[in-house]
Image: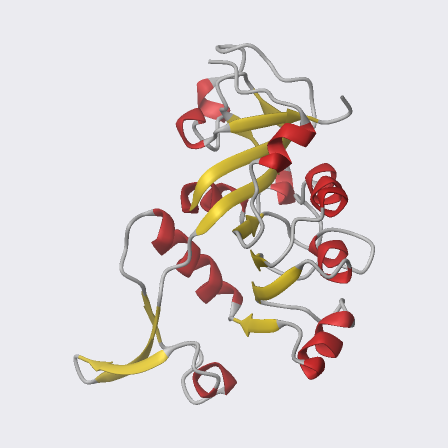
Amino acid sequence: MNKIISLQDAVNKISNGDVLMMGGFYTIGTPEDIVDEIIRQKKSNLSLISNDSGTPTEGIGKIIYAGLVKKLTASFVSLTPIVSELLEKGELELELNPQGTLIERIRAGGFGLEGVLTRTGLGTMVEESGIGTRINLNGRDMLYHTPLKGNVTIVEAYEADQAGNLVFRRTQRNFSDTMCFSGDLVIASVVRPIKKPGEIDPDSIMVPGVLVDYLVQQGV
């Protein structure tokens, strides 16, 4: 099955109000072409889940500056000044998670687990903010966190074949492979020319094509 579609058609799959998971570690692995098309189509009222908030001119930051985001779930937002401004105005909801907790919540959502138990954040602003719920298990206090899932996951891959098998390059991988399990619909923007099935070494595949719904060829 050939899963390649146009950039415009791919972003048409995203609806206003969707929970959108986006790969990237301060824009490394962020599908900038999809981000730009989201802004062009003015997809609004989005809830974004990502490692961070990008920068004012790259990644998720551009979507936030465009006024299209109602909630952001991330682990670090300090390079995007508008986040604090919107929080003060009550125009953005922010949920900050320790980075390890965030990726485990995403993994739990993708693998059908009921949540995450961790001692990270006990007695800190993480617990005070209500993100996690303190419980006692086997005589030890810990925080329970709910799993995270998205309506749509968007990632950037270095290579792919028409069946949707993905290969990431170095830091590009970051949260992306786990997020592909956690989105109801998965769209990958591909850097190199998309190959025919069988042209990628099976041992190199990092996300199996069964998880990927659509591919966008960059530069087309």
The correct choice, above or below, for 155 with respect to 197 in the image is below
Residue 99 lies, in percent from the top left, at 53, 65
- Position of 104 compared to 79: left or right? left
Please name the residue shown 59% across and 40% down the image. 155
Q: Is residue 146 left or right of residue 1?
A: left
Residue 173: x percent and y percent?
Answer: 58, 42
Q: Position of residue 14 (x, y in %)?
A: 57, 42
Q: Name the colouring of the figure.
A: secondary structure
- Residue 11 seen in render: yes
Is any part of residue 168 visible from this angle?
A: no
The one of 76 and 218 positioned closer to us in this rendering: 218
Q: In this view, does 203 lie above or below 34?
A: above
Q: Look at the image and tell me in which quarter the C terminus lies.
A: top right
Residue for point 48% across, 10% down: 198
Residue 180 placed where, x, y %? 47, 41
Residue located farthest toward the right when viewing the structure as drawn:
57
- The residue at the point 42 percent across, 32 percent down is 211
* Location of residue 64 (image quadrant): bottom right
User: Is 164 rendered above or below residue 73?
Assistant: above
> Which sits in the foreground, 132 or 4?
4
The residue that appears at 74% across and 58% down in the rendered structure is: 61
> In the rendered view, does 159 fall on the left or right side of 129?
right
Q: Quadrant of residue 136?
A: bottom left
- Badge count: 0
